Image (cartoon, helix red, strand yellow):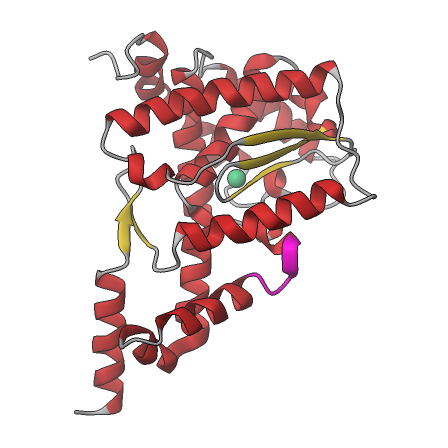
Amino acid sequence: MKKSTMMCIAAAVLITYACSTVPISGRNRISFISETEMQTAAAQSYTTLLKDPSTKVLNTADATRVKRIGQQIAAAVTKYMNANGYAAQIEGFKWEFNLIDSKEINAWCMPGGKVAVYSGILPVAKDDAGLATVMGHEIAHAIAQHSSERASKAAVAELGGSLIGAATGNKSAAIQTGINQAYGLGAQGLYLLPNSRTQELEADHLGLIFMSMAGYNPASAVTFWQRMSAASAGAQKPAEFFSTHPADATRIAQIQKDLPEAQKYFKSTSGKPVQ
Ligand SMILES: [Zn+2]
């Protein structure tokens, strides 16, 4: 058998056994780098970042709001995941929500539910529903395991032929290389690497539903993104929330299209959509 054919078979075997389904969107994602490995790396990075002397973690009324809204959404999502056969996908999650003093209009979430909101986004978020839009979006990135998907894709791209080794028993070494290459930037790589356009739109879609499950009107997401659009016009550098993909207009149009679906969860008291 030709070497190239063998490589294809090995990659196909690996990928076949390494796909999982994103809740709600139903998208099939590649994920042969385990969530547990991602969560361990993320928990360490999060702690390091919060303890860094240059990071000012706030303990204000707004910080309490961030924690309260984050916990509300996380509780609603956990209930949904457990009730719909996705409990294994949130195993090991330990949600943390912190408000960091920074002028940057940004927020991010590391694997396992480690969320940071920068104080610069608060004026744009404006109210609790705006903040719930931000946090629903970030929580969605963690629930959909977008980081391990990015690391898996990077491993496939970077490792190439060594995937044969990964498929035949030397998997952990290949995975470690994948993580290192995907997150070669160090701790910051866990949240600074841009998400793909697909992941961004998926986080918007899931986030809209998650904020609804927690009792926040998803219609608020539209006005929030309109404010973001205006704010990003004056932004100096791209950030998670200013990712140029998808463009604001596409994003807002997609959210408007997803609103009726999200509204069903908003009206629900059972955690399941109202038909
Ligand atoms: Zn995002």
> Which image quadrant is residue 59 in?
top right
Residue at the image position 35 percent from the left and 56 percent from the top: 31
As displayed, is residue 155 above or below residue 88?
below
Q: Which residue lies furthest to the right in this view?
A: 53
The residue nearer to you, when weighing 10 against 274, is 10
As displayed, is residue 261 above or below residue 95?
above
As displayed, is residue 272 above or below residue 94?
above
Residue numbers of the magenta segment = 183-187
| Position of residue 223 in the picture relative to residue 32 (left or right) | right
Locate residue 231, reporting x and y percent. 69, 29
Locate residue 159, reporting x and y percent. 43, 76
As displayed, is residue 274 above or below residue 125?
above
Q: Does the magenta stretch include residue 71?
A: no
- In the picture, the quarter occupied by the C terminus is top left
The residue nearer to you, when weighing 72 against 119, is 72
Residue at the image position 78 percent from the left and 40 percent from the top: 55
Residue at the image position 27 percent from the left and 49 percent from the top: 20
The residue nearer to you, when weighing 271 against 92, is 92
- In the picture, the quarter occupied by the N terminus is bottom left
**Residue 209 seen by the camera:** no
| Position of residue 73 in the picture relative to residue 273 (left or right) | right
Q: How many labels does the image show?
A: 0
Magenta span dominant secondary structure: loop
Locate residue 234, reporting x and y percent. 75, 35
Locate residue 210, reporting x and y percent. 41, 23
Q: Does the magenta stretch include residue 186?
A: yes
**Residue 44 seen by the camera:** yes
> Which image quadrant is residue 126 in?
top right
Residue at the image position 30 percent from the left and 40 percent from the top: 88
Q: Residue furthest left?
A: 1
| Position of residue 152 in the picture relative to residue 248 (left or right) | left
